[in-house]
Amino acid sequence: MRRIALLLLPALLAGCATMVGSPADGMGGFLGDVISLRTNPHRPVIDSDNARRITGADVQTDPLRVEDGNVWPGPLPPARTMSDMQRDMATLPPIDAPRGTAAPPASLRPAPAPAAPSARPVGAMPGGRVLNTPAGPATTTVGSNGVETYSLPDGRTGIVMPNANGTLTLIGPDGTTQTIPAPR
C-alpha cells in the first residue's frame, strides 16, 4: 500500500510545479533508495544455516552423532564437611604469630587496651551490676575485651548493649532481645 502511495505521490504533486518547482526533482534518487528492482550490492552476505532458513532456502544439515567412549569427567569429589575444615584449620599456624615461633615477639604484640570505665550504680556487685529484668535479676560482668555480659537466675546468658535513649538491650545467644531501662 505504501509503495502505491509513493508512486502516485509525484502525479498528485504535478499541479504544484508552477509554484514551488518540479515535484519530481530528486524523486528518482529517493525511489531508488526505497524500492530496489535489482540486486542490492549492500545486502549482507548470508552464509549461515539460520540465515538461509530465514530466507526460505532449503538447508541440509548433518544429524548429530553419538561420540565414542565416555565424554563426561569422573565423579565429583566428596563434599567437605565442617569437621574436615576444622581439622585442616587446626594444623595451620596462628595468623598473628610469625612463622617458626609459638608467640609473636614483644615488638609485634598489640598494646593492652585501656581499662573501660566502670560505672557502678546502686545495686552494683563487685563483678558488675544487677539489672532488673522480667525473668528476674540479671548479674552482669565486663570481660577483658570490654564487652558486658549478663547471667539470669535460670542460667541463660547473653550480651548487654547500651542504647543512647537510656535503655539496655539484652541479646541472648539464640538472638532473642529484651529492652530494659538502664539503672540510674
Image (tube, rainbow, N blue to C red):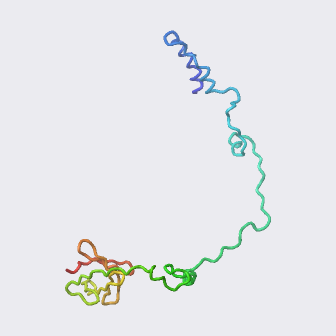
> Which quadrant of the view contains residue 26?
top right
Residue 73 location (% of width, % of height) = 71, 69
So how many labels did they put on this image?
0
Residue 101 location (% of width, % of height) = 53, 84
184 displayed left or right of 40: left
Which residue is drawn at the image coordinates 71% and 29% (left, top)?
39
> Which quadrant of the view contains residue 45?
top right
Q: From what the image shows, is residue 46 above or below residue 67?
A: above
Viewer-side residue, 23 vs 98:
98
162 displayed left or right of 111: left
- For this orientation, the residue located farthest to the front is 107
> Which quadrant of the view contains residue 111?
bottom left
Which residue is drawn at the image coordinates 57% and 81% (left, top)?
88
Residue 110 location (% of width, % of height) = 41, 79
Viewer-side residue, 74 vs 102:
102
Viewer-side residue, 87 vs 11:
87
Which residue is drawn at the image coordinates 51% and 86% (left, top)?
102
The N terminus sits in image quarter: top right
- For this orientation, the residue located farthest to the right is 68
178 displayed left or right of 92: left
The C terminus sits in image quarter: bottom left
Q: From what the image shows, is residue 79 above or below residue 38?
A: below
Q: From what the image shows, is residue 141 above or below residue 63?
A: below
Residue 38 location (% of width, % of height) = 70, 27
